[in-house]
């Protein structure tokens, strides 16, 4: 008697595929639940639960549950963290409306810790092809991010103060430079310089800065693209030498139009103060130093500070290039 096992094999393959689809849906649902709880909690979304434990647990869960009954090749295991990170990025951008800065910062964490979570599962599967699913309940992995979330809510992140400094040298004395620092009206798209933050990540560029008043208490009203505005309230006014201000954000335009997790006066980030200092050099030249001081409160201050150094540094380099360009134009026109 001859039997045909192909229909049975096809049916089993379909059941296995649907099981794998179910695994993916369960993993994404757990991720969304952790995200919503993190957003609603006092610890905020930037914590170990979302950035470390969640990608590791999800990858391990998918690798374990998805490979039951299958003889996966090594490449199938190794692609899981990459596909999971890309899926999280797409969902974050299209569904959760996350900003590009947040997504780019989170992507390396999701890939790196995804591989960390994958590694023990892969080693075990490689040595044990036939595994009883009752040996280890894969769904228990999904509890780990929720437990980590409880810890995030209870432990205050470390605080750190950082200062970003950029400089440029112009061929003009400090007395000629000073007026160009006070107000920068009508910045055109051709001014400034190319940088990664504003040309690749598409962060807004400044379009104008107007001054109201003079001396301490004066206000520089800064306007950026996409309707962003903020104020720089002058605290130190030394003509020809230094200008210092504290930042004020009268509306939520920055984090609403860039990234809602980058709130300039929020629980993770506090942009404090900044200013210019003019340093006379030989030959009638002047070094313009622009600095910004901010405070961080995340579990990953070193990593966040690296991004702060580069993003704020790019913004400062662009502003200094605008100022230097206008000073050069003044000299070409023979302005005093």
Image (cartoon, grey):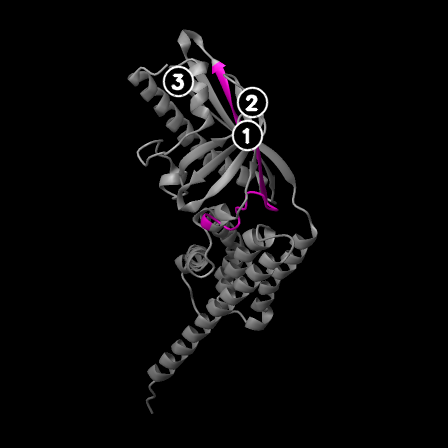
In the rendered image, the residue lying farthest to the front is 213
Residue under label 2, please give it: 237
Measuring from the top left, give residue 243's x and y in whole percent: 53, 24
Which quadrant of the structure image shows residue 153? bottom right
- Measure the alpha-carbon separation of dots 2 and 3: 21 Å
Q: Position of residue 9 (x, y in %)?
A: 37, 80
Q: How would you rate the neighbour count of disc 3 (Cα within 10 Å): few for under 14, some for 14-19, many for 20 or more?
A: many
- Of callouts 2 and 1, the N-terminal one: 1
Badge 2: few (under 14), some or many (20 or more) residues near its Cα, within 10 Å? some
Relative depth, front residue between 23 and 217: 217
Q: Which mark is residue 218?
A: 1
What is the C-alpha distance between the residues marked 1 and 3?
26 Å
Mark 2 or mark 1, whichever is nearer to me: 1
Are the two marked residues, 2 and 3, in contact with CB atoms closer than 8 angstroms?
no
| Residue that extends furthest to the top in the rendered view of this protein | 283
- Closer to the chain start, of discs 2 and 3, is 3
User: Residue shown at 36%/34% (left/top)?
Assistant: 186
Figure quadrant of the C terminus: top left
Q: Are marks 1 and 3 in contact (CB under 8 Å)?
A: no
SS of the residue under disc 2: strand
Whichever of labels 1 and 3 marks the residue nearer the N terminus, that label is 3
Residue 310 position within the rendered picture, expressed as x and y whole percent measured from the top left: 46, 35
Seen in the image, is 330 located left or right of residue 109? left
Q: Does the segment drawn in magenta span residue 46? A: no
**Disc 2 and disc 1 in contact, CB within 8 angstroms:** yes
Q: Which residue is mark 3?
A: 170
Q: Secondary structure at mark 1?
A: loop
Q: Is residue 273 magenta?
A: yes
Magenta region, residue range: 257-279
Q: Quadrant of the N terminus?
A: bottom left
Q: Is residue 120 visible?
A: no
Q: Residue at x 65, y 60 (%)?
A: 147
């Amino acid at each position: 008697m001859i039997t045909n096992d192909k229909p049975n094999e096809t049916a089993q393959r379909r059941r296995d595929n649907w099981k794998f689809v179910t695994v993916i849906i369960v993993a994404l649902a757990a991720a969304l639940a952790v995200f919503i709880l993190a957003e609603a909690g006092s610890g905020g979304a930037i914590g170990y639960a979302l950035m470390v434990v969640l990608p590791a647990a999800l990858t391990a869960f998918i690798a374990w549950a998805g490979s039951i009954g299958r003889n996966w090749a090594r490449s199938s295991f190794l692609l899981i963290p990459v596909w999971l990170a890309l899926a999280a990025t797409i969902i974050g951008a299209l569904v959760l409306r996350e900003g590009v800065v947040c997504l780019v910062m989170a992507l390396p964490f999701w890939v790196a810790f995804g591989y960390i979570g994958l590694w023990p599962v892969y080693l075990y599967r490689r040595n044990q092809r036939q595994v009883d699913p009752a040996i280890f309940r894969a769904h228990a992995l999904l509890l780990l991010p929720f437990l980590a979330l409880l810890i995030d809510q209870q432990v205050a992140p470390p605080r750190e103060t950082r200062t970003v400094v950029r400089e440029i040298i112009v061929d003009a004395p400090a007395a000629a430079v000073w007026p160009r620092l006070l107000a920068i009206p009508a910045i055109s798209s051709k001014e400034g310089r190319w940088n990664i933050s504003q040309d690749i990540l598409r962060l807004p560029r400044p379009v104008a800065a107007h001054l109201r008043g003079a001396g301490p208490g004066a206000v520089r009203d800064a306007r950026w693209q996409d309707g962003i505005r903020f104020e720089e309230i002058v605290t130190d006014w030394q003509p020809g030498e230094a200008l210092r201000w504290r930042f004020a954000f009268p509306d939520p335009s920055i984090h609403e139009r860039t990234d809602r997790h980058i709130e300039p006066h929020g629980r993770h980030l506090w942009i404090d103060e900044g200013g210019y200092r003019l340093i006379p050099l030989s030959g009638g030249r002047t070094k313009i130093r622009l600095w910004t001081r901010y405070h961080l409160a995340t579990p990953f201050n070193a990593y966040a500070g690296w991004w702060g150094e580069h993003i704020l540094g790019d913004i400062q380099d662009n502003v200094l290039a605008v100022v230097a360009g206008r000073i050069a134009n003044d000299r070409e026109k023979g302005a005093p």
